[in-house]
Image (cartoon, rainbow, N blue to C red):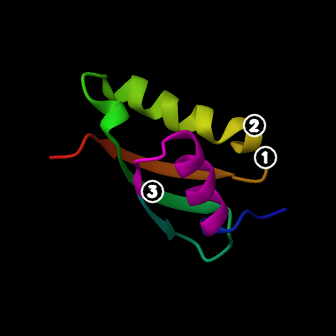
Amino acid sequence: MPMPAAEIARMIKQSLPDAEVEIRDLAGDDNHFAAVVVSSAFVGKSKLQQHQLVYKALGGTMGGALHALQLQTMPPK
């Protein structure tokens, strides 16, 4: 079952309340997305740790309802 972009953003913001989240549907199928996530939670963390925080926020949806997520993360400037 596909997952709407708004639901992805909601889940990320629920876990990272200060996050600015931009989601793009890459294939128009609600399964393949690109996301840009900016959060102060990323300060001092490696890219791997930043991505892990986002994947944790998405729970078990990766590989299921959410098939692919191209992820770009960064702390605020």
Q: Describe the element under mark 1 as helix, strand or loop.
A: loop
Residue at image position (56%, 58%) is 9
Q: Is residue 77 left or right of residue 41?
A: left
* As drawn, 30 above or below 75: below
- Compute the Cα span from label 2 to label 3: 17 Å
Range covered by the magenta-colored residues: 6-20
Few, some or many C-alpha atoms within 10 Å of disc 1 (few <14, some 14-19, many ≥20)? few
Q: Amino acid at mark 3?
A: Ala
Q: Is residue 12 left or right of residue 44?
A: right
- Of callouts 1 and 3, the N-terminal one: 3
Horizontal and vertical percent position of residue 56:
61, 32
For disc 1, the marked residue is 64
Q: Describe the element under mark 3 as helix, strand or loop.
A: strand
- Compute the Cα span from label 1 to label 3: 17 Å
Q: Amino acid at mark 2?
A: Gly
Instruction: Name the mark on residue 60.
Output: 2
Residue at image position (60%, 38%) is 57
Closer to the camera in the image, 11 or 1: 11
Q: Amino acid at mark 1?
A: Gly
Few, some or many C-alpha atoms within 10 Å of disc 3 (few <14, some 14-19, many ≥20)? some
- Of callouts 2 and 3, the N-terminal one: 3
Q: Disc 1 or disc 2, which is closer to the eye? A: 2
Q: Quadrant of the N terminus?
A: bottom right
Q: Is residue 35 left or right of residue 8?
A: left
* Residue 25 lies in the magenta-colored region: no
CB under 8 Å between callouts 1 and 2? yes
Closer to the camera in the image, 30 or 55: 55
Instruction: Name the mark on residue 35.
Output: 3
Horizontal and vertical percent position of residue 19:
41, 49
Q: Describe the element under mark 2 as helix, strand or loop.
A: helix
